[in-house]
Amino acid sequence: MGAASAEPDDLGDSPAAPGAGTRGGGPGADRGESTFTVLVAAGANLGIAVAKAVAGIISGSSAMLSEAAHSVADTVTELLLLTALRRSAHPPDEAHPLGYAAARYVWALLASVATFVGGAVFAIYDGVHTLAVGEELGNPTLSYAVLGIAFLLEGFSLRTGIRQMRGEARRARTPLRHYLRHTPDTTVKAVVMEDSAALVGLVLAAGGLTGAHLTRSPVFDGVASLLIGLLLVYVAWVLGRSNVELLLGRPLPAPVREAIHAELLAVDQVHSVLELTTLMQGPDEALAAAKVDFRDTATAAEIEWACERAERRLRERFPQIKRVYLDPTPGAGQRRREGLDPWGDEGEG
């Protein structure tokens, strides 16, 4: 049947997810919340990047310069995430009848590449260069001040992202850690992971800076820079993998698929569900398609109304499912009576 329009719901990957209720505020409110979260992170990272760069030049710390590159990469990432939110908000049109929700994952994937290229590569290079050539240490006072301020700003940004993700996890009725791993909202996931990595990076930079000035050896600073680079490689890999998985096509969680199957079987005139396909199209929308064997005694009108009832039932229980397509398909018994292969699409008469 035709596509169904409904409010979104989080697609958790837990047994409780099928019973999750609708999300208050609708898709516009959710998108606005994500936009605010990304804007907070972008503003914090832009100011921090400039301060870190100045402090790194004055102190001569490679770890501080690596952190500056980290913040620049994060700023670029947030700009790409804002683009993802804007592009994915476009309504369906003739050229893209299923909408632009997947555009979010394309731009979020580019954001993970920016994290790797802009932050990780520079940090690793700077760390290797410091260990091989050394560095001239300057006054670390400004660096400590910048690190302290940066820690507060990054902490505020992380708090904003976690607050949004905790609300989404609560509505999906799944633990926060589990939701963070499986959420289809990769923009907020990127903010949370990057801010978490930023806080860890600040601690590493402070440790490298302290060790270098206490021992007068640049080794500590170089090692800290290398660790920051490896941390960013890990973040970029996790975010990239999540977006690639969603771009390739991830189904709804198994408990949700089982509940959809049960809802279809509960409809009058439905004899069996031969095949069920689900697809996440965006953080707040999904598609469900099924080959359904209707009772042989059902009339064409009864089958049509059964499809309408099935669509309505799925919409009401799973508001994240925006499109439902049901394909009336003869079952094994009818195929045998017609002299067809009960397990194939074709057979000899």
Image (spheres, rainbow, N blue to C red):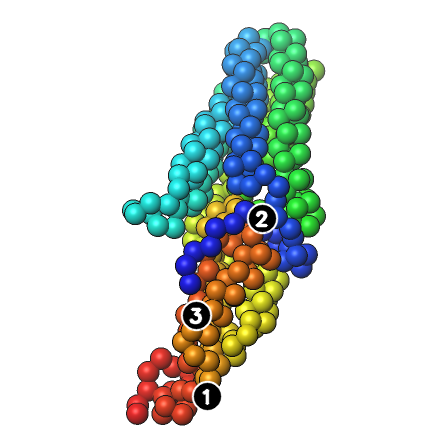
* Residue wearing tag 3: 304
Q: Position of residue 161 (x, y in %)?
A: 62, 33
Q: Residues within 10 Å of mark 3 (few under 14, many from 20)?
A: few
Disc 3 is placed on an element classified as helix
* Residue 201 seen in this snapshot: no
* Residue wearing tag 1: 333
Q: Position of residue 69 (x, y in %)?
A: 50, 23
Given residues 79 and 53, the one toward you in this image is: 79
Given residues 315 and 12, the one toward you in this image is: 315
Q: Quadrant of the C terminus?
A: bottom left
* Type of amino acid under label 3: Glu
Q: In 3D space, how far apart are the residues under numbered discs 1 and 2 (Cα atoms)?
A: 38 Å
Q: Is residue 347 left or right of residue 273?
A: left
* Mark 3 or mark 2: whose residue is earlier in sequence: 2
Q: Is residue 274 left or right of residue 182?
A: left
**Label number found at residue 18:** none
Q: Position of residue 85 (x, y in %)?
A: 46, 35
* Mark 1 or mark 2: whose residue is earlier in sequence: 2
* Type of amino acid under label 1: Gly
Given residues 38 and 198, the one toward you in this image is: 38
Disc 1 is placed on an element classified as helix
